Image (cartoon, grey):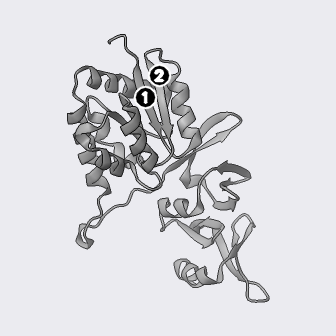
């Protein structure tokens, strides 16, 4: 490896995700952080201005997603790129590539180091363009909307990273009873435990399987199989009672669709 340090750009709209990569890179004396970007537009501008050797690029971001960032720069002009995502369905084939890699959040230190080694190797071999094209092709195939006859199988969240007591832990989506909005945060309710994540309810609604979760109110998403009863309170208000006794408000505009999903 040449003495010159690799300059890395970290692109992610989640502060915790950016800090995680920053902390891991701080352990490597051969890498320096060139900068950060928090959305796709900022990523494009930073890549053009800073000309980093390596980019950690989130796939799902506001304004432009990771694919649109690559398209704006041009795959042949992209630096070595390690894509990151919370959707592990995207990564099945990408892990098999020999160079620039793909990380599924939350990733451990060993997996991160493996991806960094592969990126460094692709840079040394001047093989970045070919590998970027391979990853871009893979991602495009998995994210391009299909025609009605193709029976697409959307990739929904299976696990969510949360920070608790200074540590990052993984919460399986299958264990979430319901989710409520709390200012800029969403609170995951699992039994008697509550975990706060900085995520918009709209984004969560889109990334959760609609056959399993339903947004009963602008500030409440419920796991359908946790619902015990649909309640009609005096005054025309509605609510659901969960199997643990928790009662949650239901918007009048969502009541009929919820009743249909419950078969009542």
Dividing the picture into quarters, in which one does residue 215 lie? bottom right
What residue appears at the point 61 percent right and 36 percent down from the top-left corner?
168
Most distant residue in the top direction: 3
**Quadrant housing the N terminus:** top left
Q: Is residue 57 above or below residue 185?
A: above
**Quadrant housing the C terminus:** bottom right
Return the residue nearer the eye: 30 or 231.
Answer: 30
Position of residue 238 in the picture relative to residue 257 (left or right) = right
What residue appears at the point 42 percent right and 24 percent down from the top-left corner?
113
What residue appears at the point 36 percent right and 32 percent down from the top-left corner?
51
**Residue 221: image x %, image y %?**
61, 66
Kindly state the secondary structure of the residue where label 1 is placed.
strand
Q: What residue is shown with label 2?
A: 32
Q: Real-space Cα distance between discs 2 and 1?
A: 6 Å
Dividing the picture into quarters, in which one does residue 101 lie? top left
Most distant residue in the bottom direction: 235
**Residue 152: image x %, image y %?**
30, 64
Are dots 2 and 1 in contact, CB under 8 Å?
A: yes
Q: Residues within 10 Å of mark 2 (few under 14, many from 20)?
A: some
Q: What residue is shown with label 1?
A: 8
Q: Is residue 184 above or below residue 223?
A: above
- In this rendering, does residue 263 appear at all? no
Position of residue 216 in the picture relative to residue 146 (left or right) = right
């Amino acid at each position: 490896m040449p003495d010159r340090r690799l300059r890395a750009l970290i692109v992610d709209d989640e502060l915790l995700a950016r800090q995680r990569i920053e902390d891991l890179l701080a352990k490597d004396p051969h890498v320096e952080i060139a900068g950060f970007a928090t959305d796709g537009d900022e990523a494009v501008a930073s890549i053009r201005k800073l000309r980093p050797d390596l980019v950690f690029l989130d796939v799902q971001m506001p304004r432009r997603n990771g694919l649109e960032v690559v398209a704006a720069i041009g795959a042949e002009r992209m630096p070595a790129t390690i894509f990151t995502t919370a959707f592990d369905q995207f990564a099945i084939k990408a892990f098999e590539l020999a160079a620039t890699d793909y990380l599924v959040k939350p990733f451990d230190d060993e997996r991160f180091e493996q991806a960094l080694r592969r990126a460094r190797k692709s840079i040394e071999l001047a093989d970045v363009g070919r590998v970027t094209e391979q990853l871009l092709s893979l991602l495009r195939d998995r994210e391009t909307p299909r025609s009605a006859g193709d029976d697409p199988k959307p990739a929904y969240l299976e696990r969510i990273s949360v920070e608790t007591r200074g540590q990052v832990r993984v919460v399986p989506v299958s264990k979430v009873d319901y989710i409520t909005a709390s200012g800029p945060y969403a609170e995951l309710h699992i039994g008697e435990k509550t975990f706060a994540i900085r995520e918009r309810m709209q984004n969560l609604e889109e990334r959760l399987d609609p056959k399993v979760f339903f947004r009963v109110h602008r500030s409440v998403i419920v796991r359908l199989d946790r619902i015990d009863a649909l309640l009609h309170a005096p005054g025309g208000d509605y609510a659901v009672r969960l199997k643990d006794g928790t009662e949650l408000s239901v918007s009048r505009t969502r009541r009929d669709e919820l009743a249909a999903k419950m078969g009542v």
